[in-house]
Image (cartoon, rainbow, N blue to C red):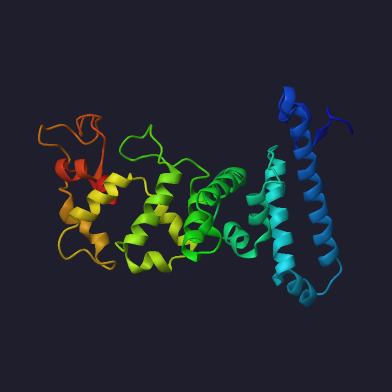
Amino acid sequence: SSGINAEYGGFTWNRIIMPGEHKYDGYVKVRALEETVANLEQKITENVYDQNVNTIKQYANSTEGTLDIFQWRVLKIIHNKGQIVDLDDEIVQWILSDREVLEMFMTSGDVQDNKYKKALTILADLIREDPLIKTEPLRMRLAVATALTFSTNVRSMAVSRNYINWMARYKSYLQLSDEGVLYEQFYKGTAWHLRYVVGSWQTEEEHAWARANTPEGYDDPAKVPNGCHPMIRYKLRNDDDVSVHTNNYYYKLPVTMKAIHEIGGVCGAISK
């Protein structure tokens, strides 16, 4: 099939291309994406088809092969979902052509529902905000972790209708790392590890409260997980005899860590 109305790669041209003055620009970007994916697929095939195992390994482990494979993978996913990525964007070009950041982006854990377009957009926006991500390893790992984690919205535990702001989360941990108040493990963690850090359901205010109220003797990486037990009273009913299994246990207040500490809870509260 051919022409602008044709079905191609899982989507319809007229459905994806924006109307009005943006129509041609959208068409050009779609064509550029599909041509890039096709060219990468052809190049990879030429380098692995009918080759011995050692030759394939050599190609796959080389910078050229690594970039080819990861570029093809991420752009193929985006294309198959009927989405557009601006391949002329300077920051996007840098991400796709830098082995360290692209390999980290593609090997630091699962992306829910293959939302790589959103993850790529977040990472590009973080770099625009903080260009030092390109050269400072910790910032790069933190940025990649943030982009991958927030490709799916992270809800606040205290107020489930609210979402954690990914830019604020990145800047918060960057500031805390500069202030030296974080455990040593933070500075050593990979992007995969840091996803568990930035993906916290608690707000920055709750993090500050937790740091200030960790029981004495538990302010240590090996002991802090057990600090929740002395901080929370295990109670099936609150002080007004309301069951934990109702919506009124926390008096319809935001279920912050401070509220859990003061009112109590059961196993779910302790785990949070």
Q: Is residue 63 above or below residue 141?
A: below
Q: In the picture provided, is 27 more to the left or to the right than 96?
A: right
Whole-percent x and y of residue 113?
Answer: 58, 43
| Residue farthest to the left, as pictured | 239
Q: Looking at the image, which residue is at 41% across and 50% down?
A: 171
Q: Quadrant of residue 108?
A: bottom right
Classify residue 161 by image quadrant. Answer: top left
x, y (%) of residue 152?
Answer: 50, 42
| Residue farthest toward the bottom in the current orientation of the protein | 54
Count of numbered tags: 0
Describe residue 160's horizontal placement relative to residue 81 as left or right.
Answer: left
Q: Residue at coordinates 15% horizontally, 55% vertically from top-left?
A: 230
Q: Nearer the viewer, residue 48 or 138?
A: 138
Name the residue at 52% across, 49% down. 126
In this rendering, does residue 9 appear at all? Answer: no
- 28 vs 182: above or below: above
Camera-side residue: 20 or 33?
A: 20
What is the residue that sits farthest to the top in this orientation?
20
Please tell me which residue is depicted at 68% across the width and 44% down the height of the picture: 78
Location of the N terminus (image quadrant): top right
* Residue 204 in picture, x, y percent from top left: 32, 46
Residue 36 seen in the current view: yes
Residue 226 position within the rendered picture, expressed as x and y whole percent measured from the top left: 23, 61
Is residue 229 rendered to the left or right of residue 134? left
